[in-house]
Every structure is written in C-alpha cells, then in structure tokens.
Image (spheres, rainbow, N blue to C red):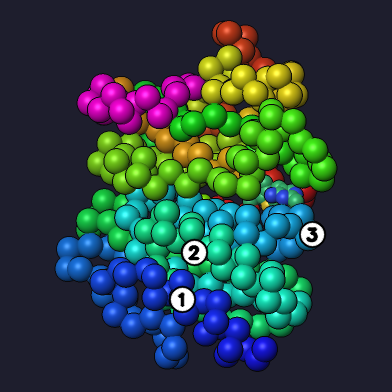
Amino acid sequence: MGEFELIRRYFFPIAEAGNTSAVLLGPGDDCAIQRVEPGRDLVFSVDTLVEGVHFPRDYDPEKLGWRSLAVAASDLAAMGADPVCFTLALTLPDADPDWLHAYAAGLASAAAQFGLSLAGGDTTRGPLTLSLQVHGTVPQGQALQRSGARAGDYVCVSGTLGEAGAALKFLGSQNPGPDEQSVLDRYHYPASRLSLGAALRGCASATVDISDGLVADLGHILEASGVAASIDIAKLPLSATLNRLVGEEAVNLAMNAGDDYELCITISPKAWEGLPEEIRSQLTIIGEVTSGEGLAITHEGQSLAPAAGGYDHFRT
Ligand SMILES: Nc1ncnc2c1ncn2[C@@H]1O[C@H](COP(=O)(O)OP(=O)(O)OP(=O)(O)O)[C@@H](O)[C@H]1O
Ligand SMILES: Cc1ncc(C[n+]2csc(CCOP(=O)(O)O)c2C)c(N)n1
Ligand SMILES: [Mg+2]
C-alpha cells in the first residue's frame, strides 16, 4: 500500500463523514479551506503525541485514535472554543493495515463525538508520532484565556483528578479488576470538556486544561494573570475508586500526575452564583485567588510545603 492509497483508504472516509459546512475544502489539495463566520475568532492549537512518551509502546491503536484527538480538543475546551475541524500529521514506522484500520476507527468516533471534521494532514514514515492541529471558533473577543484571574476569584476544577495518572501503573495489566479498569478508561478516553468550556465563556475569568498536572497548569494561570492562589487539598475532587486503589498517594497524583484533561478555572463569586446549576455541578471549588505570586497549598487551614512538579518534557 502506497502513501496516497493509505490516505484515501483510511482517512478520506473520516473527512467525508464530518459534514462541517465551515470546511469549504477538505483533504486532497495543498491546503484545506476553512470559512470563519464574520464576528467570530479562529482559535487553534497543535498537540504532538510520541510513542513511549505520551502513550506506551504497542498501545491499542483504536484507543490511540480516540486519545490523540481528545487531548488536542482539550485545548479548545480550555479556550471556550466551539470545535470545527482538525488536521492530522501522522508519522508511522510502517503501513500496517490492521493498525491503520483500528486507529482510523478510534479517530472517527472521537471526531464524531467532538464535532471535529478531518480537514487534511500529512503522512510520513518514521518513529510513531502524531500531531493534531485543532481549529475552533468563538464569538469575537470571547475566547477564555489564562490571564484573567483576579484576587477574590474562586479556583475550581471540573470532574475528578488523578485517575489518569494512576492508570500508568496498570497500563501493562493483563487482567485489570473493575477499579483498575475504571482508571485505565480515564487514561484511554480523556475528558475534553468542550461543552463546559463553551458554557464558561463570559463567566470564567481564566481557564486552562490540566495536561501536565493541577499545580503546574494552575501555575500557568497564576503567572499569566500576575496573581497568587491557595488551594485546600481536602477539597480536591478525588473519586472513591482512586482512594481505594492508591490510598494516600491520591492527593499527589491529583496535584502532579497530569493526563486528566479536566479544566481548571477561576471565576468571581458573583459569576459563580450566576452559573446554571447544571454547570456548577460539574465543578468543585478548591481554593481562591489572592494577590502576590505563587501557589499556597493548605490542608484544613494548615499550610503545606509546595508540591514540586508537574510533567515537564525536559525535566521529568
Ligand atoms: N515550538 C514552539 N513555538 C512557539 N510556541 C510554542 C512552541 N511550543 C509551545 N509553544 C507555546 O507555548 C505555550 C505552552 O505550550 P504547551 O505545549 O505546554 O501548551 P499547553 O496547552 O500548556 O500543554 P498541552 O501541550 O498539554 O496542550 C503554548 O501557548 C504554545 O503555543
Ligand atoms: C506511557 C506514558 N507515560 C507517561 C505519561 C505522562 N505524560 C506524558 S506527556 C504528559 C503531559 C502532557 O503532554 P504535553 O505537555 O506534551 O501535551 C504526561 C502527563 C503518559 N501519558 N504516558
Ligand atoms: Mg493546554
């Protein structure tokens, strides 16, 4: 199978299934064409996944198909963007039809689930690496950013934290039990809080998605906004499953492991009161923004030493 046959066979059908009218021209030409409606801003980001770094060697290709788009889409969620389309740069060691079929199936279901149409890409031979560029739009000027946190805002996170990090221990398990399977699913099928992100436009003061770990990613908000914050570890949303599986390590995983793809947001108390209950119920208040710099971590009022870390490609 040659390069162009591979693209036509496995990826054109995904592009054809995505019927976004904003994609005027999909795969097949030198570029894709996206029309951005007047009054909206284009929001875009690229994410690379490398075998052995972002996912294990010999990882299930169908899961990789889903995960590769989900982690990229998570950046659109963090900006409050409505998803439109994506491109896929695929570097493969060889053209294995079974692998490609399964990868394309996982990618196609994620594309349908997230409302992202495949608009084009690039296919090359080399060590397994995937780069996905995602495009979304927001009403002009309304993209959520990291820089808007103000002293007095609440710090909140969506969902529960730490399970995807715990899953790393069980990736090689032959026979995972129900708790292990449940954390593995958080790793295989990350959250990508697209509708939550969009609902927070005009409400949240700052947002970030948690890819590297809560401490690191909240740190990005604090730095960009020129503020400090304190969070109480007793308030962290930890699932019963995580507590059962890893006990006391749950807090450290929630703070530093990353891979959760939940949102961390700041929001003024007034805007919080104005949020519909359906949105508030997806969020947990874990602390507040203060003036100054840095992140203070407390446990029931006692201050703890700052936890180091988060994922850093050149330090981890
Ligand atoms: N090579 C690069 N050239 C220009 N800008 C870059 C480059 N690498 C990263 N950036 C920018 O630096 C910022 C941080 O990058 P990073 O990849 O950590 O994004 P992130 O959203 O924090 O993490 P994730 O990759 O998990 O989505 C982003 O705004 C990104 O656009
Ligand atoms: C097999 C395996 N080992 C370790 C990890 C942990 N990990 C790797 S990259 C990253 C941060 C996000 O990447 P980026 O900042 O490049 O988007 C994290 C938390 C993993 N996902 N899989
Ligand atoms: Mg991000």
Residue at (57% x, 47% y) in the render: 189
- Residue that numbered label 1 is attached to: 13
Residue 206, position in %: x, y? 39, 40
> Which element carries disc 3, helix, strand or loop?
loop
- Residue that numbered label 3 is attached to: 57
Q: Is residue 315 left or right of residue 102?
A: right
Q: Amino acid at mark 3?
A: Arg
Taking depth in this image into account, of 63 and 214 the one nearest to the observer is 63
> Which element carries disc 2, helix, strand or loop?
helix
Q: Is residue 232 above or below residue 122?
A: above
Pick whichever of labels 2 and 1 is earlier in the sequence. Answer: 1
* Residue 236 can be seen, yes or no: yes
Residue at (17% x, 68% y) in the render: 38
Residue at (60% x, 40% y) in the render: 186
Residue 58, position in %: x, y? 78, 60
Report how far apart the C-alphas of labels 3 and 2 lie in the structure.
22 Å
- Looking at the rendering, the stretch of residues picked out in magenta corresponds to 270-291
Q: Nearer the viewer, mark 3 or mark 2?
A: 2
Residue 62, by quadrant, is bottom right
